[in-house]
Amino acid sequence: MKNKLKYIMALGVSILIYSSCQRDLLNPIPQTSVSDASAFSTVARVQAQVLSLYGSMKSGNFYGGRYPIYGDIKGDNFVNELSNLITGSDVWLENPTNSATAVLGLWGAAYSAINNCNVFIDGMNAGGTTVVGSALGANYIGEAKLVRAVCYYSLLQYYAKPFAANAGSGLGVPLRLTAIKGTGFSNLARSTVAQVYTQILQDLNDAEAALPLTYTTAYNNTTRAHRNTAIALKTRVYLSMQNYASVITEANKIVSATAPFTASSGVAHALQANISNVFVTPYTTTESIFSMPMTTTAGDYPGTQNGVAYYFSPAAAQGGIGNGEYSLNVNGIIADPGWTASDKRRTFLKQSGSGATLKNWVIKYAAPSPYTDYVPVIRYSEVLLNLAEARVRSTSTVDAQAVALLNAVRNRSDATTTYTTASFASSGALTTALLNERNIEFLGEGLRWPDLARLLLAIPAKGSAPVKNATDVGYIWPISSSELNLNTLCTDN
């Protein structure tokens, strides 16, 4: 059954409206012989379609690899080694153009996944819910809305100014909420950042109300959306909006008041005693709230130049499994004296060469080509740190629970470091420690750029790449040229 499910997630999208060319991503035309009516005519077909939504989200150009990769190389922890535009050297340099591989690929993959969600929601409302029953229909629509929310959130991180820049009044992205099934539907102006966030939160609230508390297997609890997935993602969204009171409200639903911190309802989320367990088979720990699964089945892995390990692991000649695209910046987080040598997260690092040729690499993802490591979307440790930061920022105090949450994440990897409230001279010092902890904990998982952006922080210089300030041109990406060519109402950044 598990193999069948994985196969459906990879190939089920073929019964949805889907195309690989950029023009069809904006104006998709039905490419299969399955009509709208018959696509929702049986329980099996409906189930295949909802699973295929995750398949479109884990495209190699999106959450299967490149979205988290760009989130790291756009930050300050990596140095580009090969100057390859196809693998994001322009993203690293902060100068991609409208027609850059990254700009086109991420935009197209995200909007393709969004349209798949819209096709599905429209089809369920038109008759699919009648076929599967109201309860299951509501669950499935909740899954579609959660996937759509993740897509829109992801687009905002790269193509729109952060919420904090102008309280969300700046231009966001076109907000497409109905299915595109033919030509003539490209023109749509960009909504504001605040309007897109409002829709994201509406989708996540709807999902929370509709999704099941749990599934019957750890695999489904990790790879499909359930109630706690929606709650966890809301803590991320509200943190990006600097709405710290709402972060606390949401996090308190799935984080106990005292250590050991766990979720008391729904999936029993908790930190793993050893962080290494998160990144090895079966990848389905209770810490992994939502991940993109991969297998060796053709089409069910990200593709060579999309896999996270391909970018961050050294080449075979240097003892790795990747292509050595990005080594670690010696002035980045690895230089932080607070990241002790005994910290278990240091085992995710590898050195090659010596002297002038010495390089440091991330080997958190260890499955060789075709790169079948699950890609984390959100982990429980992030929820804990989201809550801790929100508590400090909302009270401007050295909050005791925030310190305890920080200790929970730090101590499970570094037993030599335990903080007390006396460890921090001010709330600012505690906030700095929390941001550093995030930088260590999520290295290679794509959170660095969103963390810098939500606080309007400059991207520090790295190698030959200069400092990029929040007010500089290029702090965010230009709009995809494919969108601008077809959508006359869309304006560029």
Image (tube, grey):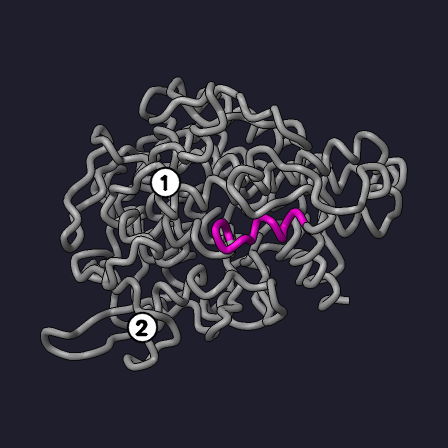
Alpha-carbon neighbours of circle 2 within 10 Å: few (<14), some, or many (≥20)? many
User: What's the residue at 39%, 54% (across, down)?
Assistant: 69
First reached walking from the N terminus: tag 1 or tag 2: 1
Which of the image's four quarters has the N terminus?
bottom right
Q: Amino acid at mark 1?
A: Ser
Q: Could you tell me which secondary element the residue under label 1 belongs to?
A: loop
Where residue 240 sits, quadrant-wise, is top left
User: What's the residue at 36%, 63% (across, down)?
Assistant: 311
Q: CA distance from mark 1 to mark 2?
A: 29 Å
User: Of residues 204 and 2, which is closer to you in this image?
Assistant: 2
Disc on res. 99: 1
Disc on res. 314: 2
Q: Nearer the viewer, mark 1 or mark 2?
A: 1
Where does the image place residue 7, in percent across and percent down from the top left? 70, 63
Q: Is residue 8 visible?
A: yes
The total number of labels drawn is 2
Note whether 368 is above or below 427 in the view shown: below
Q: Could you tell me which secondary element the residue under label 2 belongs to?
A: loop
Tell me where the magenta segment starts and ends, as one range: 52-63
Where does the image place residue 95, in percent across and percent down from the top left? 25, 41
Where does the image place residue 103, in percent across and percent down from the top left? 39, 42
- The answer to whether residue 126 is left or right of residue 242 is right
**Is 13 in the magenta?**
no
Alpha-carbon neighbours of circle 1 within 10 Å: few (<14), some, or many (≥20)? some
